[in-house]
Image (cartoon, rainbow, N blue to C red):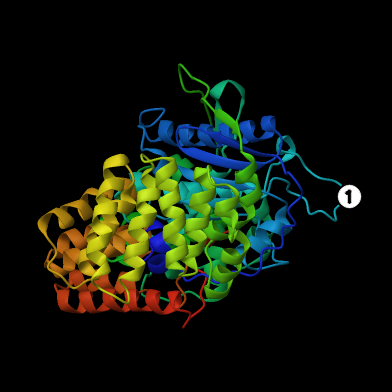
Amino acid sequence: MDIRKWSRAVGAGVALAALSISASARAEWWQAETAHFIVYSESKKEDAEQFARLLERYDNALRYMQNYPVPGPDMGEANKVTVYRTGDISDIAAIFGAPESPVAGFYIPRAGNTVAFVPAREKRRDSMSVRTLNEQTLGAQRVLFHEYTHHFMLTNFSTAYPSWYAEGFAELYSTLDLKDGGSFHLGNVPQDRGPELKLLPDTRLSRLFDHSVKLSGIEQYQSYTVGWLLAHYLNFNQARKGQLPAYLTALNKGENSLEAAKRIFGDLDKLQAEIRKYKSGPFPGYDIKPPAYVEPVVTMRRLTIPEEDMMRAHIRSQRGVDVKAAKDVARDVAGKGATYPDSLPAQLVVTEAQLDAQNFDEAETAAKRAIAIDPQSSLAHLMMGSIYLARGEKDKTMYAQARPWLTKARKLDPNDPRPMIGYYLSYYESGETIPEDALFTLEEAWDLASYDRGYRLLLARQLLNENKGKLARSVLAPIAFDAHGQDDENKVRAAVDFIDQDKLAEARTKVAEIFQEFKDARDGKKKKKKEKEG
């Protein structure tokens, strides 16, 4: 098990097409770091700095509206969202694995390694003009805001949201207009949803609120737009003030969604008529100016020659690779460790690529070089632990050898959840009795990894094995209605339903089926893309 990106196996089955970005000689790359983001940008320094500040201001706005401290607490470098800005929309579509598609950006929530990919230029290379950051109003920026809102919700909220509201909430906030001086406007219309709003049929609220109904493809697609419209209306309409919180509270107490909607919203046909009229506008909004605004601090540095040279391979690894792509990347970085013997980033990229390709000896050589360069590198020790965890899949005695490296990694960076999760997995996967300290460590990762669907499933599985049904339910409920990646049965929701019926054995079976599907996807038996895409 590769703990560095372990939720790649238990959160997403990844197949990656060949990366089509043509690397220019000595491309200019900058790292811009804020309290909650690390941005690697193929751009001019000023553009990279502005983009990072924009993201941090968005996080600050979300915090202010939820009455959280601004800026938020320091969660450590491993818990910052790493954003890669490169190429144009065509390049991002290729990185995603769907060349010629309209994918303008995407995000992968992984414990200790959350990443997003957006273009440095919005227009394609064959366009007559290229928009700079200052001219961007839609596209990649809004995609990233939308997905970061999901990240923020799962990190900070314990409430279970139905998919229409989770998406509607993200759509509502993704159009936040950040103005000079720290003020911002909430309530703008997502203009790119306009054609859907006008031309496509509405999703019936009686079906949207009924979680036993499987929505059709067009209904599922429209749930984003109708979800935004409904979220906007219920948040801004004074006559219905308080209804939305009451509905969400009822849902989290286990009340049937459709019955709760009828009780709280009243006649659903009447509500449907109201929002149908509402979509013609005007749409109210709020102008908000936080007091004592402080501009976010952005730390800038130009990437080193080894980092720039290896950035393409690094991006492919961070995106996620299947068996073939892993071998391709490993070939691309072959010899780079010797070429850059004093570069910690180079050794870490080589380690990652060789580990993905299951070239464990080569990975270990690079990891040892990394530790020699910087004995205090938590990531280098995590890599060593990951190598032994991966070897453990064929030789279970290797799991015990992973633990000292993972323990050291955790001491070096107490805010990185990956060594915690890896330490627990070293016992679970080996079949040994799991000691109390490993169980405690798994639970302790909660504050650092609750946004990761895979981690929630892992924790819920363990809680169910301990017959702690109520706790398992609280862990699973916020992802039980997740619209992303649900193509057949919603097994997470089924597990929650079994827990509500006090059928813990059936709930354990359902969760086990989820993990088996993840394993099949990782091993190439199924090819599914579970990432959130724009």
Instruction: List x then y, in percent, for residue 113.
Output: 43, 51
Which residue is pictured at 13% across the width and 53% down the height?
Answer: 437
Q: In the image shown, does 381 or 219 lie closer to the viewer?
A: 381
Mark 1 sits on what residue? 128
Is 431 on the left or on the right of 216, as rendered?
Answer: left
**Image quadrant where one finds the C terminus:** bottom right
Determine the residue located farthest toward the bottom in the rendered image: 525
Is 44 on the left or on the right of 265, as rendered?
Answer: right
Determine the residue located farthest toward the top in the rendered image: 292
Mark 1 is surrounded, within 10 Å at the Cα level, by few (under 14), some (14 to 19) or many (20 or more) other residues, namely few
Which residue is pictured at 68% across the width and 29% down the height?
Answer: 46
Is 194 on the left or on the right of 400, as rendered?
Answer: right
Q: Is mark 1 on a helix, strand or loop?
A: loop
- Hey, what amino acid is under mark 1? Met
Instruction: List x then y, in percent, for residue 416.
Output: 34, 46
Relative vertical location of residue 371 with respect to residue 89 in this rendering, above or below: above
Relative vertical location of residue 433 with respect to residue 191 in this rendering, above or below: below
Residue 189 visible in image: no
Residue 21 visible in image: yes
Instruction: List x then y, in percent, for residue 274.
Output: 52, 54
Instruction: List x then y, in percent, for residue 531.
Output: 50, 63
Q: In the image shown, does 444 or 59 lie closer to the viewer?
A: 444
Give residue 162's quadrant in the image: bottom left
Q: In the image shown, does 308 or 530 lie closer to the viewer?
A: 308
Which residue is pictured at 37% across the width and 38% down the height?
Answer: 76
Give residue 492's quadrant in the image: bottom left
Which residue is pictured at 16% across the width and 74% down the height?
Answer: 504
Determine the residue located farthest toward the right in the rendered image: 128
